[in-house]
């Protein structure tokens, strides 16, 4: 999976999770807000309380019914009362009930009470722990006391004494007016204590009974069948004033809930943003810092608190969880860092090699140049008359040194190109048997004057291997030249090709003078020439050093076995 696909999946999953959290807390906030509104409504007018809310506020433990303190407070504040009746009709809980209410109800009483319910009572059917209950809420309306007094006084007074002092007292207390009508709806008498209230119309009287809590006036009525007389009591509706303020309280509750929900949402968004910053911000900042270090030439990954551990790694060496989506990027940066380190080392190596090349070249060219310069000065001198033979010797010496310089420059150039992996190789698959046989025979034909005996022993079956023909031939020729140059005439020099299990070997061996251990160990060093030789030591001193480099360039190894006066064996090994 690519970095892009990995990040897309990560972002989708995490955004879905973040949205789920937001939706969850939004629903919780709305539920809390709705609960607050219902609770506020219950405080202002308990009769509007939903059954589900009331049911959640009533507890049943060991057969005992208890009511939430907030519910009690709401009922008492409205000067109301509450009864909770079980399915047998027995009152299991009562609060602030008026005198005269029974402690148990028959089925007939409950049916009559519910069928004749008025605005004074509200009923709820509840299911608490799989048990059925009926909750009855009654409000003590302001004018109930006046109507009760009017009814009592009716039996004690004639028509002229109807408005007794007791009635006047309760009317004055509530700032209420009393209106008395005959059977023709004509006003017989009125007693006014509140000039701000006008005589109610029939429409007001009927409409009030429908929704009394929404009216500015409070109206109570009583009809006397014996005298065919109607009594209407009218007073300011205190509940209406509270109702007006309740809307303000509800708005405050809604506003408070919205503010709290908004704050919670902002906190959640902040936490999600902080989490995203930790999850994706830190790895990106780390990658940018890493790139900045690479641009400055500091080829290493930024470290964490532990100076021996990269910031992206745990103590066990594994990637931190926040860095796992960027695993491919981290690995690529590590490869880039290693490549830059290797490139820097290679650059230093090339610079060092260049200095060595210049130093070695200047040193190696100094002697032949001195010789050429000396003969040139001698030939140009007028103080001597050189014979033709002497001049010819001078020219021969100059030519030999110039040829030596040419070979030296070519060998030095070759050895440093190999050393810096700058030598172009054109490999092709050949049969090693045929190639080796041809190279040995060609060397023998061009070096017959050496008076050595050459033999070639190869496998019957072909051995195919990819080589650069030019440089692989030079390996064989260099080894044969070295064996021919440093051994006496008549030495037997043999080349043997053998096929192994997973490799093949080429042996170049002779029965010559051999070499001591010191010479064997330094045989492939630059400019080293053995001391146990009998012939001249012309050559650049780089032949065997180049040979070893070319063998390794062909993914092979070279080993030397030698013993003085018993000969030398050089083994080349190449893996198939």
Image (cartoon, rainbow, N blue to C red):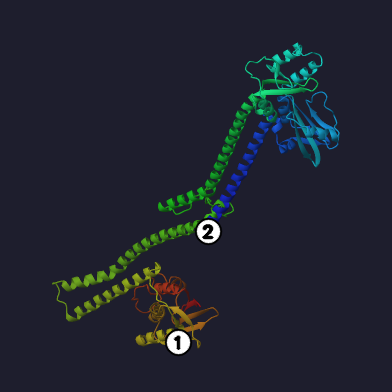
222 sits to left or right of 26 = right
412 or 108: which is nearer to us? 108
Neighbor class of circle 1 (other Cα within 10 Å; few <14, some 14-19, many 20+) is some
- Which quadrant holds residue 419? bottom left
394 or 433: which is nearer to us? 433
163 sits to left or right of 37 = right
169 or 323: which is nearer to us? 169
Extreme residue in the front direction:
184
Res 405 seen here: yes
Q: Which mark is residue 222?
A: none
Give percent across and percent down for residue 512: 44, 82
Residue at the spot of label 2: 5
Residue at the spot of label 1: 456
Q: Which quadrant would the N terminus be assigned to in this image?
A: bottom right
Res 565 seen here: no
Neighbor class of circle 2 (other Cα within 10 Å; few <14, some 14-19, many 20+) is few
Residue located at (61% from left, 30% from top): 247
- Residue 134 in the image: above or below residue 438: above
Residue located at (55% from left, 53% from top): 12
Q: Are the two marked residues, 1 and 2, in contact with CB atoms closer than 8 angstroms?
A: no
Q: CA distance from mark 1 to mark 2?
A: 63 Å
Give percent across and percent down for residue 272: 56, 45
Residue located at (55% from left, 56% from top): 9
Q: Secondary structure at mark 1?
A: strand
Give percent across and percent down for residue 23: 60, 45
């Amino acid at each position: 999976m690519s970095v892009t696909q990995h990040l897309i999946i990560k972002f989708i999953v995490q955004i879905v999770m973040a949205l789920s959290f937001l939706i969850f807390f939004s629903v919780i906030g709305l539920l809390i807000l709705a609960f607050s509104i219902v609770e506020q409504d219950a405080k202002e007018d308990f009769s509007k309380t939903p059954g589900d809310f009331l049911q959640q506020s009533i507890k049943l433990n060991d057969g005992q019914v208890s009511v939430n303190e907030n519910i009690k407070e709401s009922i008492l504040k409205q000067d109301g009362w509450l009864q909770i009746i079980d399915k047998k009709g027995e009152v299991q809980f009562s609060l602030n009930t008026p005198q005269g209410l029974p402690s148990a109800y028959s089925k007939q009483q409950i049916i009559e009470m519910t069928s004749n319910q008025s605005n004074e009572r509200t009923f709820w059917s509840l299911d608490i722990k799989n048990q059925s209950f009926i909750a009855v809420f009654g409000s003590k309306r302001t004018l109930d006391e006046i109507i009760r007094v009017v009814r009592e006084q009716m039996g004690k007074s004639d028509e002229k004494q109807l408005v007794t002092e007791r009635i006047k007292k309760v009317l004055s207390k509530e700032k209420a007016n009393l209106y008395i009508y005959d059977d023709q709806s004509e006003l017989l008498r009125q007693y006014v204590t509140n000039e701000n209230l006008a005589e109610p119309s029939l429409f007001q009287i009927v409409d009030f009974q429908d929704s009394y809590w929404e009216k500015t006036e409070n109206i109570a009525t009583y009809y006397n069948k014996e005298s065919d007389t109607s009594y209407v009591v009218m007073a300011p509706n205190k509940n209406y004033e509270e109702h007006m303020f309740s809307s303000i309280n509800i708005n405050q509750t809604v506003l408070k809930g919205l503010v709290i929900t908004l704050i919670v949402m902002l906190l959640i968004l902040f936490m999600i943003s902080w989490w995203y910053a930790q999850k994706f911000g830190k790895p990106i900042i780390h990658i940018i810092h890493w790139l900045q270090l690479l641009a400055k030439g500091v080829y290493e990954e930024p470290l964490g608190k532990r100076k021996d551990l990269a910031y992206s790694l745990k103590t066990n060496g594994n990637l931190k969880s926040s860095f796992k989506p960027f695993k491919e990027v981290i690995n690529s940066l590590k490869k880039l860092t290693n490549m830059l380190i290797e490139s820097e080392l290679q650059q230093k190596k090339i610079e060092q090699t260049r200095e060595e090349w210049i130093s070695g070249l200047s040193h190696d060219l100094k002697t032949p140049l001195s010789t050429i310069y000396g003969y040139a000065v001698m030939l140009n001198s007028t103080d001597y008359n050189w014979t033709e033979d002497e001049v010819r010797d001078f020219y021969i010496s100059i030519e030999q040194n110039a040829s030596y310089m040419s070979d030296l420059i070519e060998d030095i150039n070759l050895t440093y190109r190999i050393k810096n992996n700058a030598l172009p190789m054109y490999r092709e698959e050949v049969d090693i048997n045929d190639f080796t046989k041809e190279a040995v025979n060609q060397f023998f034909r061009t070096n017959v004057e050496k008076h050595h005996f050459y033999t070639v022993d190869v496998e019957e079956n072909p051995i195919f291997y990819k080589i650069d023909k030019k440089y692989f031939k030079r390996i064989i020729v260099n080894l044969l030249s070295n064996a021919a140059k440093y051994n006496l005439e008549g030495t037997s020099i043999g080349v043997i090709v053998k096929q192994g299990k997973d490799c093949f070997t080429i042996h170049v061996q002779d029965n010559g003078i051999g070499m001591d251990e010191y010479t064997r160990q330094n045989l492939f060093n630059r400019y080293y020439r053995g001391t146990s030789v009998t012939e001249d030591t012309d050559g650049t001193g780089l032949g065997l050093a180049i040979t070893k480099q070319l063998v390794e360039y062909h993914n092979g190894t070279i080993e030397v076995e030698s013993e003085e006066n018993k000969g030398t064996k050089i083994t080349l090994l190449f893996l198939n």
